[in-house]
Every structure is written in C-alpha cells, then in structure tokens.
Image (cartoon, grey):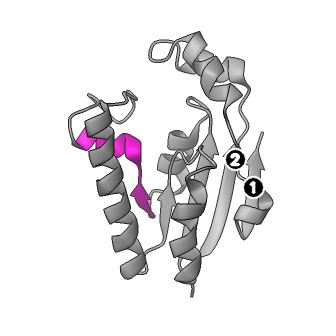
Amino acid sequence: MKPIMIILCGLPGAGKSTFKNTFLSSYLSISRDYLRYAYNISPSEEIKIVGTKEQEELITKVFNYEVDTAIKCEKSCVLDNMNNKKYRPDLIRPFKKAGYTIIGVNFKTPLEICKERRKDQISEEVMDKIASNFHYIEQEEVDILYNIL
C-alpha cells in the first residue's frame, strides 16, 4: 500500500490542529507549530508564536529534515498549516516522486470565527492580512481534495 501525505490548510483558528489531533493521531505529524514549541519559541503547541528570522530558519531546516526522514522511511504523515501556495510545490514534489498519495484538506472556516478563536493570540489586523494573502489548496496540487466548510 502506498504511503499517504495529508496536507491541512486553513486560516489560524480554522480547526486544523483539532482535526489532526482527533482524526489523524496515528499519522506522523510534521508541524512548524510543534517545532516552535519543541525549540522553546512557543510556550505550547496551542499558543502559536512566530520566532525571529534566525529561529524560523532553524525551524525550516528541522521541518525539511523531518520531511526527508518521513519519505526515506515511507511513513504516512500529515503536514499541518500549509497555507502558503508558494512553498507547497517544493514540499509536495518529493512526496509525489516517492509515490505517496497526496490528500489535501481545506478548512474553510469563516474569518470571523477564526478571529474569535485566536483573538488572544493574533490581532484582527494580522488576521485580515493573513486572510488577504491566503491560498487554499487547489485540485491540481493533490490527488484527492476535501473542503471542510
């Protein structure tokens, strides 16, 4: 059976982590949010703090190492918070090349609900900026696409 790579995409507060922890807990999770917690940038995985440029460069290196390791071990995995369309092809390509089935899941939670859920962590202005530059996964990027409304 081919390994699976699931990409979760949605605004902060859309429900990606809750979905992952509830329904995909048996999959290897590769998450920048978890890495920020593991490297003491964020006080918990739930409190989403972005680090300095240097810290984020480290997180990117570790994230890429985890992706490479998952592929080498043929582990099915879930990548959380893959919102930037510019970076997705570079992450999807090696999984496709390795024969993974790529599943995309878009969390299309309304912006106002996301703002309310994250109001103690992200200002409305920042949420508006994130939403204005947001790119959901498109069908041509993946083998299977689900939209959660």
Cα separation, mark 2 vs mark 1, equals 6 Å
Quadrant of the rendered image containing residue 1: bottom right
For label 2, the residue is 106
Quadrant of the rendered image containing residue 109: top right
What amino acid does circle 1 point to?
Answer: Tyr
Could you say whether the residue bearing mark 2 is in a helix, strand or loop?
strand
Single out the residue that lies furthest toward the bottom.
1
Q: Position of residue 26 (x, y in %)?
A: 44, 63
Q: Is residue 89 visible?
A: yes
Query: How dense is the environment of label 1, judged by Cα within 10 Å: few (below 14), some, or many (20 and up)?
Result: some
- What residue is drawn where x is 70% and y is 47%? 106
For label 1, the residue is 146
**Which is more toward the observer, 7 or 90?**
90
Q: Position of residue 134 (x, y in %)?
A: 67, 36
Quadrant of the rendered image containing residue 16: top right
Extent of the magenta region: 26-38
Q: Position of residue 43 (x, y in %)?
A: 26, 28
User: Of callouts 2 and 1, which one flags the residue occurring earlier in the amino acid sequence?
Assistant: 2
- What residue is drawn where x is 55% and y is 53%? 87
Give the quadrant of the C terminus: top right
Q: Is residue 63 left or right of residue 149?
A: left
Q: Is residue 25 above or below residue 102?
A: above
Instruction: State yes or no: discs 2 and 1 in contact (Cβ < 8 Å).
Output: yes
